[in-house]
Amino acid sequence: MHIGFDGKRFFQNVTGLGNYARSTVLGLAEHFPENRYTLFAPRLTGPFCTMPLPEALHVQEACPAGRVFPALWRSLAIPAAASRDRVDIFHGLSHELPLTNFPPQVRTVVTMHDLLFLTHPQLYPWIDRKLYAWKYRRSCRRADLVVAISARTAEDVQELFGVRPERIRVAYQSCSPAFSAPMDASSLESLSSRLALPRDFVLFVGSLIERKGVRTLIEAASLLPQGERPHLVIAGTGPLETALRDQARSAGLESRTRFLGRVADADLPGLYRLARVFAYPSVGEGFGIPILEALAGGTPVITSTGSCFAEAGGDAALYAAPANAGELAAALARVLGDEELRRGMIERGLRHAENFRIERTSARLMDIYKELAAGGKTR
């Protein structure tokens, strides 16, 4: 088979959808090299444009006019380029397909990550909600199959977009194998020294936006008895950073809260392993990939109830109601104060993470491609 992808996020996005695109495409190329894979890129720019690519993976750059008007090329010209390259399946990796139609011989798949702009509308500007709803609904209705990265997202696509369940497939994502790779003590000590980390700390990794729940984490830490308050290490950037710093100061946690900013990808696996606990009190996600990254490295996880979190955390994590600082504080106290509980969570987390190894998630997606190729159009 020849499978094509929109390469914009693969090359340009450093987190989130970019990580999904790279993990998905590179995993397929590594574990199913008998197929041909093409990234359609309007222009080769961004932090990943010079990375080495597997032999089975090729890049088709836009024509000169497409490089000048990349958004128009992605929206209007990719179907014709895919047809010329004899693509069998085109996979839109981040909610969207081009606006123009593909020829009948090219089957189409679109991945839906979440519909949080509809399930949590208060977190998104009005214009964003309207634009996302129009683009994503249109892509779901035009695609031959919709891939949802969690069962929760699949339910939302069915209920909110009216997509029939027989046209939806759940295919979980993976994280980089680096998060489960062995690390020696000297490397961890060096990282801890370089980042000036406290000896024991609770870690958060993610964007500093309202949805991620960092306000709740800081409040929860302040609710613990003075002598039991943990150090907090917050890795990420975003518009709430100043407000979060002010909150930590007002709560008397300024000296116990370390803001790292954006952490290099190469340092993230070690950062998770150095943490005593990973806290991810988000109010909603499509999957919650940091949960999987922490579990794969042997770090206990506390996250939220609802949304997709039980899919990512399984029986390994502890759960607290989103925005409930009291419940989160109680969960933190349990894990920080009970070493036997911590060891059990680590063991269960490592087992749970095995379900999301890159070879398994790649095989699941390849089964979906084969199903579509064998069965033709599903609509």
Image (cartoon, grey):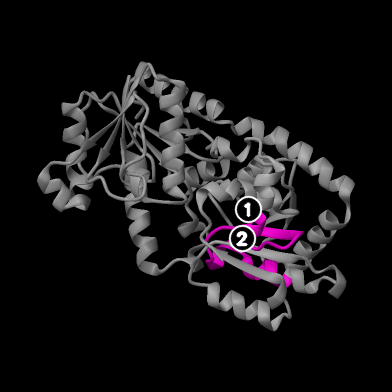
Disc 1: which residue: 191
Instruction: Specify the quadrant of the image occupied by residue 4.
Output: top left
Callout 1–callout 2 Cβ contact below 8 Å? yes
Vertical placement of 105 versus 317: above or below? Answer: above
Q: Is residue 57 left or right of residue 182?
A: left
Residue 1 percent coordinates (x, y): 33, 19
Q: Residues within 10 Å of mark 2 (few under 14, many from 20)?
A: few
Pick the residue in front: 360 or 319: 360
**Label 2 residue SS:** loop
Q: Residues within 10 Å of mark 1 (few under 14, many from 20)?
A: some
Pick the residue in front: 166 or 368: 368
**Label 1 residue SS:** helix
Vertical placement of 354 versus 21: above or below? Answer: above
Instruction: Specify the quadrant of the image occupied by residue 335.
Output: bottom right
Rendered image: mark on residue 82:
none
Magenta-span inclusion, residue 287: no
| Res 237 seen here | yes
Residue 12 percent coordinates (x, y): 34, 50
Residue 241 percent coordinates (x, y): 54, 72
**Looking at the image, which residue is at 67% across and 68% down?**
216
Q: Which residues are magenta?
A: 192-219
Number of numbered markers:
2
Q: Is residue 258 left or right of residue 13?
A: right
Disc 2: which residue: 195
As shown in the figure, which amino acid type bears the numbered disc 2? Leu
- Marks 1/2: CA–CA distance: 6 Å
Pick the residue in front: 219 or 183: 183
**Looking at the image, which residue is at 62% across and 43% down?**
292
Q: Is residue 226 left or right of residue 364?
A: right
